[in-house]
Amino acid sequence: MSRKGYWMAMIDVRDPDVCKQYIEANAVAFAKYGAKFAVRAGRYASPEGATGNRHVLVEFESYDKAIECCHSPEYRHASKFRLAASAGHFVIVEGA
């Protein structure tokens, strides 16, 4: 059995209106690849320094699905909005 895959992102949103376009567009890719949000914004504490103003953890059934989603045409289209609206850190990891 393969391990789950996760997208982890810590983002500073500069343009909330364009970020809304990203959220609408990424829904297409996330539905296609079975993504589930474990964390999507919400309250947070940064006890060791700045981490951005938006935090997201997305779960996929496997690491391979997480990679496939990232490289899909649907997500590539959506990512243009994220890159225009924000700066931050994004990583894809394999679960324990």
Image (spheres, rainbow, N blue to C red):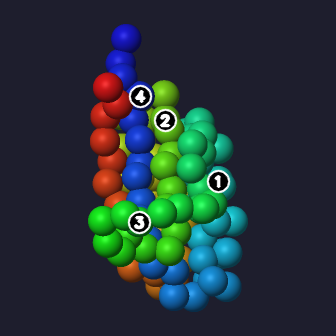
- Residue located farthest toward the bottom when viewing the structure as drawn: 15
Frontmost of labels 1 and 3 is 3
**Which badge, 3 or 2, is on the more N-terminal residue?**
3
Answer few, some or many: residues within 10 Å of disc 3's Cα (few below 14, many 20 plus, some between 14 and 19). few
Q: In which quarter of the image is the C terminus?
A: top left
Q: Residue 60 carries which label?
A: 2
Is 50 rendered above or below residue 32?
below
Q: Residue 4 carries which label?
A: 4
Q: What residue type is labelled 2?
A: Phe
Whole-angstrom CA distance, mark 1 to mark 3, is: 31 Å
Closer to the camera in the image, 54 or 18: 54
Label 2 SS: strand
Residue 83 is drawn in which quadrant? Answer: bottom left
Q: Which mark is residue 28?
A: 1
4 and 2 marks in contact (CB < 8 Å): yes
Is 60 rendered above or below residue 22?
above
Q: In which quarter of the image is the N terminus?
A: top left
Label 3 SS: loop
**Which badge, 3 or 4, is on the more N-terminal residue?**
4
